[in-house]
Amino acid sequence: MNPNWSELKREFQQRRETAEEARDKRRRAIYGLIPEIECLDRKIAETGIAFNRELIRLNPDAETIREFEKNINTMIDKKKKLLTNNGYPENYLDIVYTCKDCNDTGFLTDSEGKPGVVPCHCYRQLLVERFYDISNLNSDGQTGFEFFNELYYPDIKAPDTYGIQESPRSRAIKIKSKCLDFVNNFEKADFPNLLFTGPTGVGKTFLSKCIALEILKQGHTVLYLPASAMFDIIYRSKYRFNNEEMPDDAYRFILDAELLIIDDLGTESPSAAKYTELLTLLNYRSAKNTKAPCKTILSTNIEPEDLHITYSERIASRILGEFDILSLVGDDIRIIKRLNQSDKT
């Protein structure tokens, strides 16, 4: 899917309308509970209209303008006090946009406070998501560090079972802490990429997406792709390029996304050409990261010491040398959740 601006424009328009409708709903409720606020809003509006007429007709002096501003601010302060005295935040009746940087216009404001021509980070992220036709990373409502539950990991030391000297729970808590370090140091060029390893169902994808959500909040672009899908996109782009056509934006997004998450690495069909492309991709992103954030997260069931078996020694060396290895262990959390749900029914 290759979206055009008209499609994205409709999305931003819908976001603004949704935010305004939510504000209007809160305002109607407050007017019913605190009628004085409705009176103040009416007076503020009437004063503003009257003053604008005076500006056009009389061209008032600076003292008159200051007096007007003082009257407006007095009413606004009184309105805020009424809200806080009744248990509401003072900005309760403000419009809450999805993106506070562009107020859901898709573009950053110019020197006059009007939407300019520089795309906002939320516009770039929406373009990436629509291009790949992927769902919002938070669409399930159950993804984020606040949903991390260490109780899913056994709190027992069983080296023969899990292959580590500490308990899976202790390991998982440490890995969560390292994930948060990655988020907090994302813009530092010398902070390493991440490699999640471990068996199926121990939380590799979940933690990757938790990181993605936090990086999105920082205003960076994030692209999450299964390895098989990513290699397919690269192949198709290269195929068109070899036929003297310029590669489309699909490959460019993979190269330039400020955070690229490649999930299930190793499940793609083996191919020497694919592995060459992976090395090229890692090298390119590593070089770009020295100037601007261009971090990569890999997730795989392959043990770090076995990477050279599936991939080349050069790829294994690149990953092991530039990625912080986070090895999760434990039982399949998806099965545990399913069993817990069965017990409740």
Image (cartoon, rainbow, N blue to C red):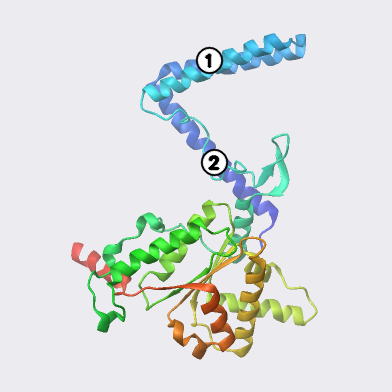
On the picture, is 146 further left or further right than 189? left
Q: Secondary structure at mark 1?
A: helix
Which quarter of the figure is the N terminus placed in?
bottom right
The amino acid marked with disc number 2 is Tyr
Q: Residue at x 58, y 56 (%)?
A: 220
Which percent across, then down, holds residue 154? Answer: 25, 70
Q: Are marks 2 and 1 in contact (CB under 8 Å)?
A: no
| Residue found at the far right of this picture | 244
For the residues carrying marks 2 and 1, which lies nearer the camera in this image?
1
Q: State the residue position of label 1.
A: 74
Mark 2 — residue?
97
Observer-nearest residue: 186 or 205? Answer: 186
Eyeballing the image, is 32 above or below 129?
A: above
Which disc number belongs to residue 227? none
Q: Is residue 325 above or below residue 81?
A: below
User: What is the three-letter code of the residue carrying label 1?
Assistant: Thr
Earlier residue among tags 2 and 1: 1
User: Does 157 sit left or right of 178 as displayed?
Assistant: left
